[in-house]
Image (cartoon, helix red, strand yellow):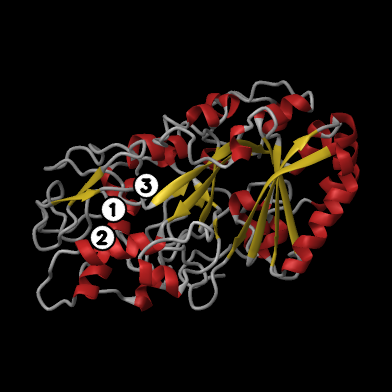
Amino acid sequence: DITGQPPLPYPEDVIRDASLNTSDIQCDILVGMKKKLELFYFFTINDPQSFKDKLHNSVVPQITSTFQMLSVSTQPIVALNIAFSQTGLQTLNINDNLADPPFSAGQFVDAANLGDPGTVNWVKAFTATKLLHGVFLIASDNQTFIDAEVQFLETLFGPDISNLHRLQGNIRPAPFAGHEMFGFLDGVSQPAVAGFNVNPLPGQLTVNAGVILVGEPGDPVPRPAWAKDGSFLAFRQLQQLVPEFDTFLFNNAPPVPGFTQQDSADLLGARMIGRWKSGAPVDLFPLADDPIAGGDPMQNNNFDFTHPGFPFNSDQSHCPFDAHIRKTRPRADQNAPLNTIMRAGIPYGKEVTQDEINAGRSNPKLERGLAFVAYQSQIEQGFRFQQIRWANEPSFVSGKSVQPGFDPIIGANHGGPRFMAGYDVVDDTQVLDLPFDFVVSRGGAYFFSPSISALRNTISV
């Protein structure tokens, strides 16, 4: 476990108290891969029947379940999951309607809706929607084992599949393990799932299992029976312009009495995210980081943006209305358990070089960012809702004394300018212009991650 992130349930607690069949749910959905390295291997299927036979006999027995990941004693050296696009399922002659319109249509046609400036920045593989059939998620603490698994799969399937794109993710080196590329601790605000997380943490949102898993209580959509305990995977390759972000903070941070310019830059970054780099929330620690609280799951989520004596609809002295973590989990601003996702992303790319720091610009040959992975039972209510209705919507959070602005981190305006209100802790009436995106979408896709029994009894027969 990474300090500050919610710990996994104990296997004995799950055996005793959990109602979900964790041995049938692919591990990435509820707990993630929990490895230092993860490869996303996107493929097209050339020979459906041969692919099915080999999937059934040689791959399904290797698929890693949620329960396996709960204990070091049962964790495999290499974790393996698989998910399919709509065209991938159709290629395998699985024509049931999964009743998820964004999944059926695919992410390529969704680019403008998501705020991308079209698909000009997209990786070519994500534009090849008729060919992008599936993705293997392969994770290990050792690159040698990932390479061996890829060799096994490519030897097994031979000409039955073609590799369209690989994205190699990696936990950042110490002391930044668990932190995304801008430097902030990630994975802190994960929900607790009823029937699995039996001991939710202070401030942790508990959602019905059906918000994340198809066919479980809380999923209101009729589905084919075989889809139960699967989940829709929204994937995005999000490039992060780290030197540009840091330079912007330094050059645009408003003065704060007693602060150096770097202190002010750190504060502006924390107010944009809603957390300090340690994970400590600005709602509890508005002027200075508290690394002990940031690393303590009993403290780092225990807030809801309300403060006695401060007017809820106008106070931004603690946390701006459009801070990233407030936009994507509004807490007291809006009770929205249906619009919850389970995130399983991992950084990709190398650490920022000294040359890039000196120039204040990213080297285009050294792309870095986040392999963003979100699981939900309805893409429309999960990933799309958070991106379109919250992050990209300047009037959300609604009912406030000022228009909050865009989520300054992931909010998108088709490549156009954005703005952030409440950035200045001294004068929260000031508005900050954001002339370029710090996060650039390189594209993505929508997949369905079936249960292990569905892989065995439906997908591969």
Count of numbered circles on the image = 3
Image point (38%, 47%), residue name: 410
Q: Nearer the viewer, residue 47 or 219?
A: 47
Which residue type does callout 1 highlight?
A: Ala
Task: Left or right? Give the position of 50 relative to 234.
Answer: right
The residue tagged with tag 1: helix, strand or loop? loop
Q: State the CA–CA distance, disc 1 to disc 3.
A: 9 Å
Q: State the CA–CA distance, disc 1 to disc 2.
A: 6 Å
The image quadrant of residue 213 is: top right
Q: What residue did someone put label 1 on? A: 323
Mark 3 Cα within 10 Å, few/some/many (few <14, many 20+)? Answer: many
Q: Quadrant of the C terminus?
A: top right
Q: Is disc 1 in contact with disc 2, using a CB cutoff of under 8 Å?
A: yes
Image point (78%, 65%), residue name: 145
Q: Residue 85: x and y, percent? A: 66, 33
The image quadrant of residue 31 is: bottom right
Image point (69%, 27%), residue name: 87
Which residue type does callout 2 highlight?
A: Arg
Q: What residue did someone put label 2 on? A: 271
Task: Left or right? Give the position of 207 relative to 160.
Answer: left
Q: What residue did someone put label 3 on? A: 328
